[in-house]
Amino acid sequence: MGFFSKDIKTLDDLFVHTLRDIYYAEKKIEKVLPNMADRASDVSLKDSFDRHRDQTGLHIERLEKVFEMYGAEAKTIGCPAIEGIIEEADEVSGDIDDDKVMDAALIAAAQAVEHYEMTRYGTLIAWARELGRNDCAEILEETLAEERATDQVLTNLAESRINLRSAA
Ligand code: FE
Ligand code: FE
């Protein structure tokens, strides 16, 4: 379904559509994070992927809660954006033999994913408020805070050690 689907007429439709988009993305990310942890060499990076996989399970549960509160069916809508980010990461990292460079590539891919999630949750929170659903916005805020924290952990890892070593 394209973005300008004729099924989307109101902000309410758009809110539900976007919930289904991020629901799809979160499920995809939950599947991909263990592969990323396997390919990472740095122990802190592996740990951060493992921890975020557990958090991602929570993000999925929170979305299911929001669907329920909003009275919309919890279902996914294919999200070409997240597919593209993951596909590109696979293509780039497929050619890397050096462990340190691989870690740098994994961090870059993971940060692209986190930033995608942050834009989606930011938008959903604003729309939930506009729709008078502060209750839904509050739940989505919890997830947004975790995405931001994860992005910060990845930035710290990249800046403090991994990028430096790959440049050495
Ligand atoms: Fe998430
Ligand atoms: Fe995330």
Image (cartoon, rainbow, N blue to C red):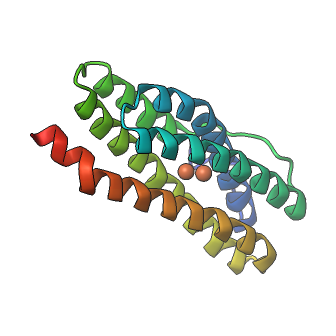
Q: Residue at x 69, y 54 (%)?
A: 19
Q: Is residue 9 visible?
A: no
Residue 48 position, x and y percent, is: 50, 46
Give the quarter of the figure containing the N terminus.
top right
Q: Relative to 83, is 110 above or below?
A: below
Q: Residue at x 40, y 48 (%)?
A: 112
* Res. 70 image quadrant: bottom right
Q: Residue at x 64, y 65 (%)?
A: 124
Residue 153 position, x and y percent, is: 42, 58
Direction front: furthest residue: 43
Residue 28 falls left or right of residue 15 = left
* Res. 151 image quadrant: bottom left
Q: Is residue 75 visible?
A: yes
Residue 83 position, x and y percent, is: 50, 33
Residue placed most toward the observer, 111 or 38: 38
Residue 104 falls left or right of residue 52 = left
Residue 109 position, x and y percent, is: 38, 40
Residue placed most toward the observer, 156 or 135: 156
Residue 120 falls left or right of residue 71 = left
**Number of marks in the rendered image:** 0
Residue 11 falls left or right of residue 38 = right
Give the quarter of the figure containing the C terminus.
top left
* Res. 132 image quadrant: bottom right
Q: Relative to 135, is 147 above or below?
A: above
